[in-house]
Image: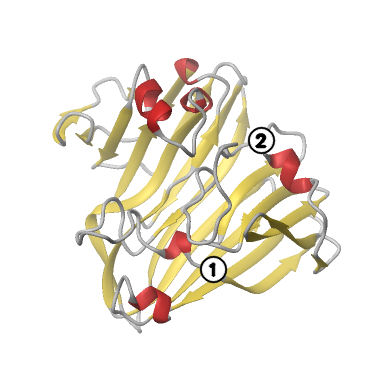
Amino acid sequence: MITKIFALPVVEQITPTLSRRTLDDLDLLVVDHPQVKAAFAYQGAHLLCWKPQGEEEVLWLSGNTPFKEGVAIRGGVPICWPWFGPAKEQGLPAHGFARNLPWALQAHNEDESSVVLTFELQSSDASRQHWPHDFTLFARFKLAATCEMELEAHGEFETTSALHTYFNVGDIADVKVSGLGDRFIDKVNDAKEDVLTDGVQTFPDRVDRVYLNAEGCSLIHDAKLNRAIEVTHHHNANVVAWNPGPALSVSMADMPDDGYKTFVCVESVNATVAQKASEEKPSRLAQTIRVVKR
């Protein structure tokens, strides 16, 4: 899928590094910089891939995901906002609407080592169909040897949210994640609370855990790709570890049947505690990713 995106014809060359391209229904922003390659969908300000120079692809993107207007993309970094998980009201989209609406590229800057992008989403008739509040939401990305992402929400409201990052791994059976926390809500086991006693999360089957005493930095240990990925969380109450396992993976139309084998989600989340935004003080959520050589 990544190769396919970079092979798409250029619709508009914005700068020597940035170009607009189209895949099915969606406009994409492709970043082709000597130090980093990346791509976004304008829908959702959705980071699809990030590959620093000399590294394997860091993010996972489903080869089955549709690129259709209003349909969530499976993989990369979905922005879940203004709610995380199922909506409280029937008929509203899971994980909010921010990932399903088109954003505007408000600013871009590049130098010899990095590319900085700012996307903006404002309240509209489309957003008010789902949520009554006025808002301005910014998504900022600094792409370099590290990947820095930040959400900033302006308005008067409370939200839950997530940067729902899908990480590319060699084989989920050989993946361990540390630095998540200890107490967690086990969504696979009737949302019961439990404790991770040894500090290491493995993925023998479906895993969906909301960690309550979230640590500031999680580490994905990938034996097959012989690397670790450091995930630093900011302005979050929780960290979520998720992999659908074989049975759920087969049931998901936008994922290959064996898709679960090559990704793990380690997410920066505000789920159990809502964030309050005001005009004087916006709410924030951020994540920084770095590849660590073994």
Query: Reading the chain from its start, which is encountered first: label 2 or label 1?
Result: 2
**Which residue lies at the image location 78% right of the left edge and 62% below the top edge?**
19
Q: Position of residue 289 (x, y in %)?
A: 55, 44
The label nearer to you, 2 versus 1, is 1
**Which residue lies at the image location 55% right of the left edge and 62% below the top edge?**
43
SS at mark 1 in the image: loop
Q: Name the residue under label 2.
A: 57
Q: Position of residue 2 (x, y in %)?
A: 69, 41
Disc number placed over residue 51 in the picture, else none: none
Q: Where is residue 219 in the image (x, y as percent from the top left)?
A: 47, 32
Q: Residue furthest right?
A: 16
Q: Quadrant of the C terminus?
A: top right
Structural distance between the alpha carbons of marks 2 and 1: 25 Å
Q: Name the residue under label 1.
A: 102
- Indicate whether 99 appears above or below 103: above
Q: In the rendered image, is residue 114 in sight?
A: no
Q: Nearer the viewer, residue 53 or 91?
A: 91
Quarter of the view holding residue 12: bottom right
Amino acid under disc 1:
Pro
- Indicate whether 157 appears above or below 111: below
Q: Where is residue 280 in the image (x, y as percent from the top left)?
A: 35, 83
